[in-house]
Amino acid sequence: MADILPIDGDHEVALTVIEDVDPVQNPPSSFSNANKDNSVCFVSVPFTQKLIAEVVGTYLLIFVGCASGLVNENYDKVVTLPGIAMVWGLTVMILVYSLGHISGAHFNPAVSIAFATCNRFSWKHVPAYISTQVLGSTVASGTLRLIFNGKQDHFVGTVPAGSDMESFVIEFVITFYLMFVISGVATDNRAIGELAGLVIGATILVNVFVGGPISGASMNPARSLGPAIVSNQYKGIWIYMVSPVLGAVSGAWVYNMVRFTDKTLKEITKTASFLRSAGSS
């Protein structure tokens, strides 16, 4: 859901699978040519690892986050809204620190698209990332339906509590907020990168408090689409496909507008030190 290290798809190592070559008939020089001309496929190991990380990360995010809602519904509201918000926020934080260095920890098509529009992620990798994210969400939703069946089976997707426009606006604003924060703490080298996971998780927590009762606080098309596919319930699904993407793209671009400065890092640090000294005096 968040990107600690935006991925550049150009830095990958490709393994080449070649046909069997007889070393007697083909000396080393010929073998080199065969390696170039007789290759049958290319397997990018790092990119495959990134996709696996996105599937696993999205699966765990949706499973744990949605499970908190199911437990709350089935066991006398023991989790409560603050508890659900904390589960989502803490899960995102844990996964960002666990998988951010592998895949960038997007777990969210809106995040992948937003980074691509800012040239911080390769467009050619966006379809693969979105596919793995939707896959992880769908499998997680299916797992929850198998566990919580019968009377315990509740829809874990997101539906508007009020009007469609109300949910649309809420989803736009909270996703804008999320992506603005991600851009600030995870892509700006002036920020404290070690705190990115904590800050992003806290932003998710706050957004669930604000948007949870109104729109379900999706902020993630995959989060809404997976449960909808499993339960075949698509009420208001267009909101969760469109609004988070628009909000994320807007948040990323607005941060890019305020990112640039003519000051050097040394000048910025001096200014910050001066302001701290003035405040303490």
Image: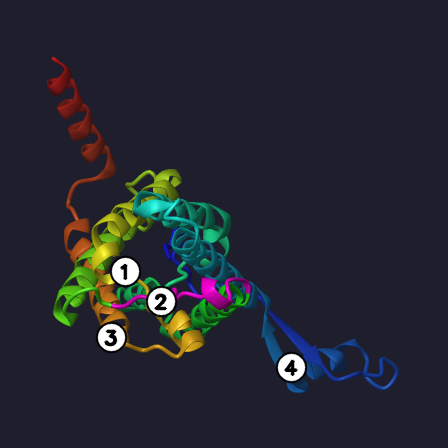
Q: Which tag, 3 or 2, sits closer to the chain's start?
A: 2
What number is the disc on residue 157? 2
Report the disc number at residue 168.
none
- The answer to which of marks 1 and 4 sits earlier in the sequence is 4
Taking the image as shown, residue 31 lies to the left or right of residue 119, namely right
**Residues at marks 2 and 1 touching, judged by CB atoms closer than 8 Å:** yes
On the image, the x and y values in percent for residue 280 come to 15, 15
Frontmost of labels 1 and 4 is: 1
The residue at the point 74 percent across, 84 percent down is 19
Nearer-the-camera pick, 25 or 164 = 164
Using the image, determine if residue 114 lies above or below residue 74.
Answer: below
> Residue placed at 22% from the left, 67% from the top?
160
Identify the magenta region. Answer: 147-159
Nearer the camera: disc 4 or disc 2: 2
* Distance Cα–Cα, label 3 vs label 4: 52 Å
Q: Mark 4 — residue?
A: 36
In the rendering, at what x and y percent does residue 23 appear? 85, 80
Q: Which residue is mark 3?
A: 236
Amino acid type, callout 4: Lys
